[in-house]
Image (cartoon, rainbow, N blue to C red):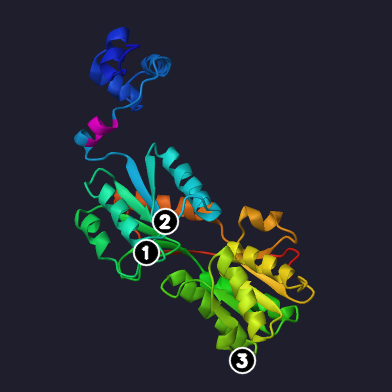
């Protein structure tokens, strides 16, 4: 047994039990005595027995494996979502396999192809920035493989998704800036191709409107990275556009904004206040610490995984879109 995979037959032979008895003992079947269960479990642990996932799949039409496709792995938000997914998966003795699209529509399709043979029980996806059509998900859905989208859902009916209230998060951020006396608030927006980008821009506009502040196209720049954040500040300064606050679509853009403002000799928050979105680890480490809209990524992962399990188990549910609340974390950039 030391040189090969331990099987139920090995455990049964060593204990002098039938294979079916060992199998039922491992499943905590009520017909098996406590003493027998104890003996089976102790021996299985000592021999480091692991169930054969492929064999279980063939027998039960379940692999207990779920796929996850995310835009970026080296990203605090997405890694925290993965942690939440894994937390729920572990409780259900399911395995998680992660692929990243690197924000590429083509690579997203390749990741889907890797899962398309039907060996996963379900899929959790956050689409790439480049994704604007969704036909590449049809094959898995046609095979009956359930899919749950998170953070960046596809805009189709009858799909399950877990999202933040990006509109309200943006609205609250801008309203907070207005309450502390800022009036010329620039927004460094995410891609218009994404639901997230559009919702945050909509929240920004609505907060201005509700507070009697005219909307200006000059104060909206599409900047969703560290580099673009810095370039956005330089563009505003070069054009002579007045601004006393910047609300960014993510914290990494805000980092670029802070660096550029320092380079331009603009004091934060005295002259310009800055609010990010995400509450990445770096938001607490930067100087000054960044005021931002917190997204509970781990909670999103937990909800997405539980939603997928319910779909796999065909648990009836009326709710197709699960919306989580964001909250403002006030630090020293405002």
Is residue 241 rendered to the left or right of residue 133?
A: right
Report the mark closest to the observer, 2 or 1.
Answer: 2
In the rendered image, residue 55 lying in the magenta stretch gets the answer yes
Q: Residues within 10 Å of mark 3 (few under 14, many from 20)?
A: few
- In percent of width and height, residue 183 lies at 70, 85
- In percent of width and height, residue 304 lies at 42, 54
**Magenta segment, which residues?**
53-57
Q: Residue at x 48, y 72 (%)?
A: 197
The image's mark for residue 320 is: 1
Q: Residues within 10 Å of mark 2 (few under 14, many from 20)?
A: some
Q: Residue at x 51, y 80 (%)?
A: 202
Compute the Cα span from label 2 to label 1: 27 Å
The image's mark for residue 214 is: 3
State whether residue 206 is above or below residue 284.
below
The image's mark for residue 102 is: 2
Q: Is residue 55 visible?
A: yes
- In percent of width and height, residue 98 lies at 39, 46
In terms of depth relative to the viewer, which is nearer, 308 or 224?
224
State whether residue 252 is above or below residue 31.
below
Compute the Cα span from label 1 to label 3: 36 Å
Mark 2 vs 1: CB contact within 8 A: no
In terms of depth relative to the viewer, which is nearer, 262 or 294?
262
- In percent of width and height, residue 177 lies at 69, 77
**Looking at the figure, which quarter contains the C terminus?**
bottom right
Q: Residues within 10 Å of mark 1 (few under 14, many from 20)?
A: some
């Amino acid at each position: 047994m030391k040189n090969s995979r331990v099987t139920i037959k090995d455990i049964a032979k060593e204990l002098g039990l039938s294979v079916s008895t060992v199998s039922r003992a491992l499943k905590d079947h009520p017909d098996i005595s406590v003493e027998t269960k104890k003996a089976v479990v102790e021996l299985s642990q000592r021999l480091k027995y692991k169930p054969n996932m492929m064999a279980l799949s063939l027998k039960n039409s379940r692999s207990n494996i779920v796929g996850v496709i995310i835009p970026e792995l080296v990203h605090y938000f997405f890694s925290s979502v993965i942690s939440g997914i894994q937390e729920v998966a572990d409780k259900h003795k399911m395995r998680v396999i992660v692929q990243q699209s690197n924000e590429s529509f083509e690579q997203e399709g390749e990741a889907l192809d890797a899962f398309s043979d039907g060996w996963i029980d379900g899929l959790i996806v956050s689409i790439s920035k480049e994704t604007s059509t969704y036909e590449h998900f049809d094959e898995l859905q046609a095979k009956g493989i359930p899919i749950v989208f998170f953070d960046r859902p596809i805009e189709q009916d009858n799909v399950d998704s877990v999202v933040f209230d990006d509109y309200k998060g943006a609205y609250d951020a801008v309203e907070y800036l207005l309450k502390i006396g800022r009036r010329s608030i620039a927004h460094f927006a995410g891609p218009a191709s994404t639901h997230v980008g559009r919702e945050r821009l909509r929240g920004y506009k609505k907060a201005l409107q509700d507070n009697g502040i005219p909307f200006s196209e000059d104060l909206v720049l599409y900047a969703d990275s560290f580099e673009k954040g810095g370039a956005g500040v330089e563009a505003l300064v070069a054009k002579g556009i007045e601004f006393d606050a910047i609300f960014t679509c993510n914290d990494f853009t805000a980092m670029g904004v802070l660096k550029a403002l320092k380079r331009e000799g603009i004091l934060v928050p005295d002259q310009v206040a800055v609010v990010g979105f995400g509450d990445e680890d770096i938001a607490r480490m930067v100087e000054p610490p960044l005021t931002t809209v917190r997204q509970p990524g781990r909670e999103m992962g937990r909800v997405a995984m539980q939603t997928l399990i319910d779909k796999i188990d065909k648990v009836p549910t009326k709710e197709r879109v699960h919306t989580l609340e964001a909250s403002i974390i006030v630090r020293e950039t405002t």
